Amino acid sequence: AGLLATSLGTQASADHFWTLEKPSSVGLSDENVRGAVDHVFNSQDAAVRDCFLVVKDGKLIAEHYSSEFYRDFSHEGNSITKSLGALLVGWAVTNNFLDMDADITKTYNVPSPRPYPVTTRQVLAQSVAGVHEANEAWAYDAGGTMWLHVLPDVFYQATGRRPSSVWNEHFAQILGLSEEFSWPSVDINWATGSEGTCRDYAKIGQLLLDRGTWRPSSIRIISSSFIDEMTRPQSRLAHPVDWASNIRGRSASASANAYLNPCYGLLTWLNTNPGSDRGSDKYPGTCQMWDERCWLPSNTPSDLFILSGVLGQDTIVIPSLNIVLVSLGTTADDYPVQRVLGEALCMLDPAGCSQNIAV
């Protein structure tokens, strides 16, 4: 079932966008890439992997399935879907339909999910968990029942179009997503619900890597500036000093520049300070839901970002190395999966990891 160009040559697929090419065509060692594939499928910390794909410089150089059954299998993306929702917002922002910093109630007539006004940016950043105001506390709305549920309505009110219509026309068709790809809940739920093949999620990662332009047809879908916003920390702690030790239970020494979650952008996870749950000098703070078991190796680039879902559904984009990794499966204890994928990245491109790009 292993599909490495080094051993099996170019492999055909129902999806003709990519043909499998040798790692050496992008300056990587065939042996290193094979070792990375073996690491992903043999690691006990990433048990039950269905696929592992590597795209570098726009070329598919590794594609491995635990069984041929999974080649065209529609995997549940789970919370990868959240990042797809952010892409829809990016389309609306790019086309001047939506102002991310506008009050969603005053501007779009969508009731706030909280007892105070919120903006689309704050909802996307998940920084609306506080009692008094936005940017008071961060929490993860896994199922879309706390605040993410307002986003499809904000999109519709801002654009006059159903999210499903825009997704199909401006994403699925342009990227050539497979017939197996579906997102039946797109008009009502962006927290979860997308399903697709491993190649489908790799294409979405490639769109992000190319900063919103689909290179094969030179079509810009989302502005590069929105991709920049999506992939950097967003929410600084409001009033960190006066409420720090009382209402919020935070240290009174909290920095005025601290971020609520320096490892989270707009519905996207960030590798802000590799090998740690602390932010960086540029983005100080403590990462939330960033269990030590999931920390990527300290030499992975800090511009790396992740579209991540439960059971170890991961699309990892590394702009400084021009690489997209995808692995899908059903790993019950999924926190270590992204660490294993980070280890695989440094195995297949050790020189790239040694650069340790700072953001």
Image (cartoon, helix red, strand yellow):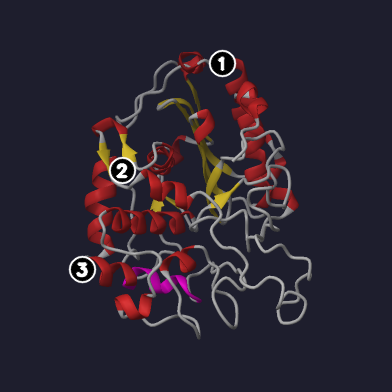
Q: Name the residue under label 2.
A: 178
Q: Which of marks 3 and 1 is in front?
A: 3
Q: Does the magenta stretch include residue 220?
A: no
Q: Name the residue under label 3.
A: 160
Q: Residue 30 carries which label?
A: 1
Q: What residue type is labelled 1?
A: Asp
Image point (24%, 45%), residue name: 173
> What segment is highlighted magenta in the picture?
146-153
Asked if residue 1 shows in the view, the reply is no
* Mark 1 and mark 2: Cα distance apart in space: 28 Å
Q: Which amino acid does label 2 sit on?
A: Ser
In primary-sequence order, the first of circles 1 and 2 is 1
* Mark 2 and mark 3: Cα distance apart in space: 27 Å
Q: Is residue 80 above or below residue 255?
A: above
Quadrant hosting residue 271: top right
Q: Is mark 1 on a helix, strand or loop?
A: helix
- In the image, 84 versus 11, the foreground residue is 84
